[in-house]
Each structure stands twice: as structure tokens, then as C-alpha cells.
């Protein structure tokens, strides 16, 4: 959904059709048309005239927003790991789950593959992505060159597809309805914290414009 | 350079970086801005895509045949498959949840496999039409792929939450691993497919469209 929500935000921004130019500096990521997207101001997006791919979309105060949302996301993720996520009550029996404990339990019951995948998709990769967003947005907003800028940006755009926080939230809702038929499910603080994390995560990632990030890195390092 | 569409970076000997979008002469082999490997078109894109698609299709068989979870109730264990679970939900009248599971675990993976295979085939055969439609199809396919992971997460939550000792317990089945494999491998297939290949056969006559 990172890209999906970004898409809906972009829809609301005024659209500028990028111009095809001979010997252009940027090639469309999807159809390879040479483009000029210079002079895009905040709150505008540039679309490839041939295939419709959004080449660049600059949100207002993108770097500051990315930074703020990434920090908020980190706090929510921490909370999501401390408190109970869901608890269950049926016929006098109670059971409670927290995110780290449920993954450890899976691992200890011999389901190490599923445990590792879930750990990576819902906790490790999203946390790493937030760390990378912060590592990029802070120096770029301050206009400072840092040795980690280039590897961080490469790593960020590689990892981003593999973060499944929002898919997990849908999974939780489906499970709630499934279990809700046979027992009383109590939604814990961590569920809300994780939901808030998902929103901040998506907002942080979509506030960073990939083309702008790379243009800035190039400008600072030259 | 007539192998590429007019106006494209490749037709002018420039390679667009797949990481940072900057164009550089293809002879450099490495992007001067971000250090990523530079190719006019992704290396062996079609071969890699089709091999991953075949792998995903094969994995989809155990994902449906094997149990995705086992319910242990008072010593009796009942296995349930993905489709079995959907049918059970329909019998219980939970149509919305049955629909979510059916869409995420059956409709999305199958249509993603079909769409990616068709896109691969259209490039392989050098189709010259419906570029915009194919581009849109690729974008949708790439976007929806990850949503299939829902079912794996549902199993994980049920397993973690329903631990009532000997009374009632849920265990994950091997189909969960196979199914996670299907999702991961189709995502890799979409990533290794170079969408620029779809536009290379675009002739001058339909440039105005």
C-alpha cells in the first residue's frame, strides 16, 4: 500500500506532463522515454506522456514530513511490541498475544520458516525502512553530505516492496472476524499502535520523492 | 539502434538507471550517481521472469493441496486447506471474510500468474499494440502481489492466539510455507520483468497515440 497510498496522494496533486527531450537527463522508469522534469515545484507531480508513469511527485515539505512521520512511526512500532496485541476469552479461559512473543512461540514450536518470514515482513523490514528514511531525510533537509546517503537510498528502494505492515493489518482484521464467532476477542493497545505505525510508515515513505532524493544526493556530493 | 522505440533513452545509446532514473552512456556499465549496474535493458529479464513464474506455479500446487492449518480440539485434529477454509466460511455465512480469503489466496495469485505470463508472452512474441493497457496491467499486477500474504498472517495470528492447552490449539500447516513461497516468487518475477521491453517495438506510426 506504500505505493498505492502514494498514488492516491499524487492524484490530488496538480499534474504536469513531462516533456520528451532529445538527450534528456532522466529516462522513464517504465517505458524508457527520455524526459525533462526540471523545475517541478513542491506539490506538483510529473507524469510520463507516453506510459503515464509518475516519474516524480513532490509533496509539500517532503523531507520534513518524511522525517516527522518516520520518528512517529518508530515510536508506534516500539509501543506495538510492548503491550498485548490481542487477547481471547472463551469459557473462562484466557489467552493473550504480543507481537514478539507470538513470533518467538512460532519459532520454538518448530515453525522457524514462517516465524522468520513474519518477523522480516512485519517488523524488521518496516523498522529498517524507517531507519533509512530518517538517515536520508535528516541530512538532506539540513543540506549536509553524509557518506551513508548513497547506500541508504539504494537499500531503501530495494527493501520497500518487502515491507508488509498494511497487509498484516488486513490479516489481523480477517482473523478478528474469524475468531469473533467463537470467542470474545479483546483488541489490545499494541494493535492500535501498529495500525498507527502503518499509517505513519506509509506517509513517511510517500513523502520522499525518489527522483528528488537522488538529485539532492548528487548535488551534495559533487 | 532501431531495436528501441523512438525517443527512448536506449535509442540514443543512453541507459536509464533502474535505481535512480539518471541516464548515462551505456558503456559506463555502472551508474555514476548511485553505483548500480547499468544496462540498456535488464539482463536476461525474460528468462528470469518465466523461470520464476514456472516456479511459482509449481509451488501453488502444494499450497492448495497441503493443509494450511490444523485445528486440534480435544485430541481430534482437523486439517484445512485454503479452499476448504473458504467453503467452511461460506457455510457459516461469513461471506465478507470468505471473499477476502478467496480474493487474497486464490484470485490474486492466479490472476497475477496469468497476467505476468501474458505480459511475458507479449514481449517474447513482439506484440506491437496496446502499450498503455499493458503498462497499466503491469502496474496493477506489481501492486496487488503482496496482498496475497494476508492468509499467511491470518494463520500466524490464529496460531499465536488460540493456545488453549489440550482443549483447543491451532498449528500451521506446510501449505503456509508453500503459499508464502508463491507470493515471494511472483513478487520476484514482477521485479525481474523489465517493463521497458514492452515499449521497444513501438513503431513511429503509433507514436502519436
Image: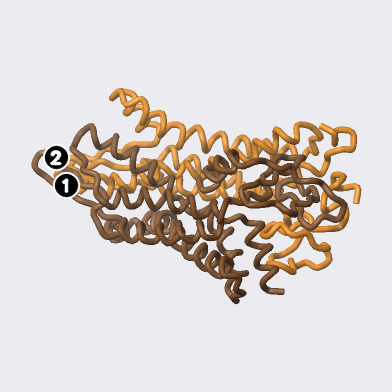
> Nearer the observer, disc 1 or disc 2?
2
Q: Is A176 on the left-hand or right-hand side of A116? A: left
Residue that sits furthest to the bottom in the current view:
A147
* Image position of B16 with respect to B116: above or below: below
How many callouts does the rendering have? 2
Q: Which residue is more in the foreground, A213 or B90?
A: A213
What residue is rendered at 63% in x and 49% in y? A57
Spot the orange chain and give its letter.
B
Q: Chain A is drawn in which colour?
A: brown
Query: Where is mark 2, residue-wise?
Result: A90
Query: Where is mark 1, residue-wise?
Result: B164
x, y percentage for residue A24? 82, 55
What residue is rendered at 58% in x and 39% in y? A12
Query: Which numbered disc covers residue A75?
Result: none
Task: Specify the subunit that label 2 lies on.
Answer: A
Quadrant assignment for the C terminus of chain A? bottom right
Amino acid at each position: 500500500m506504500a505505493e498505492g497510498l502514494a498514488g492516491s496522494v499524487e492524484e490530488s496533486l496538480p499534474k504536469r506532463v513531462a516533456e520528451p527531450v532529445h538527450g534528456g537527463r532522466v529516462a522513464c522508469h517504465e517505458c524508457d522515454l527520455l524526459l525533462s522534469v526540471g523545475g517541478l515545484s513542491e506539490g506538483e507531480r510529473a507524469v510520463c506522456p507516453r506510459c503515464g508513469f509518475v516519474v516524480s511527485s513532490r509533496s509539500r515539505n517532503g523531507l520534513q514530513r518524511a522525517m516527522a512521520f518516520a520518528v512517529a512511526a518508530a515510536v508506534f512500532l516500539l509501543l506495538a511490541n510492548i503491550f498485548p496485541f490481542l487477547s481471547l476469552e472463551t469459557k473462562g479461559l484466557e489467552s493473550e498475544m504480543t507481537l514478539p512473543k507470538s513470533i518467538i512461540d512460532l519459532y520454538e514450536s518448530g515453525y522457524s520458516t514462517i516465524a522468520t518470514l513474519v518477523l522480516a515482513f512485519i517488523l524488521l523490514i518496516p523498522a529498517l525502512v524507517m531507519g533509512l528514511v530518517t538517515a536520508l531525510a535528516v541530512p538532506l533537509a539540513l543540506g549536509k553530505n553524509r557518506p551513508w546517503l548513497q547506500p541508504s537510498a539504494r537499500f531503501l528502494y530495494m527493501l520497500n516492496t518487502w515491507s508488509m505492515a498494511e497487509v498484516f493489518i488486513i490479516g489481523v482484521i480477517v482473523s478478528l472476524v474469524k475468531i469473533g464467532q467463537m470467542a470474545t476477542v479483546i483488541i489490545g493497545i499494541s494493535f492500535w499502535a501498529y495500525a498507527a505505525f502503518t499509517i505513519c510508515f506509509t506517509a513517511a515513505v510517500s513523502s520522499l520523492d525518489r527522483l528528488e532524493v537522488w538529485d539532492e544526493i548528487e548535488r551534495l556530493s559533487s | 539502434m532501431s531495436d528501441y522505440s523512438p525517443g527512448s533513452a536506449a535509442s540514443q545509446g543512453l541507459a536509464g538507471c533502474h535505481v535512480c532514473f539518471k541516464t548515462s552512456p551505456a558503456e559506463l556499465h555502472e551508474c555514476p550517481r548511485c553505483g548500480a549496474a547499468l544496462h540498456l535493458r535488464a539482463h536476461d529479464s525474460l528468462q528470469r521472469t518465466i523461470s520464476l513464474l514456472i516456479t511459482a506455479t509449481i509451488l501453488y500446487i502444494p499450497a492448495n493441496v497441503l493443509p494450511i492449518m490444523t485445528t486440534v480440539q480435544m485430541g481430534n485434529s482437523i486439517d484445512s486447506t485454503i479452499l476448504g477454509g473458504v467453503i467452511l466460511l461460506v457455510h457459516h455465512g461469513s461471506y465478507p471474510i470468505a471473499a477476502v480469503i478467496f480474493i487474497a489466496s486464490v484470485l490474486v495469485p492466479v490472476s497475477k500468474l496469468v497476467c505476468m505470463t501474458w505480459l511475458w508472452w507479449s514481449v517474447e512474441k513482439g506484440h506491437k499494440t496496446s502499450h498503455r493497457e499493458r503498462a497499466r496491467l503491469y502496474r496493477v499486477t506489481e501492486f496487488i502481489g503482496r496482498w496475497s500474504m494476508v492468509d499467511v498472517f491470518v494463520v500466524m495470528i490464529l496460531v499465536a492466539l488460540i493456545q488453549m492447552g489440550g482443549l483447543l490449539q491451532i498449528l500451521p500447516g506446510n501449505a503456509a510455507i508453500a503459499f508464502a513461497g508463491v507470493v515471494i516468487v511472483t513478487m520476484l518475477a514482477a521485479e525481474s520483468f523489465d517493463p521497458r521491453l514492452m515499449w521497444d517495438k513501438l513503431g513511429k506510426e503509433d507514436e502519436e497515440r
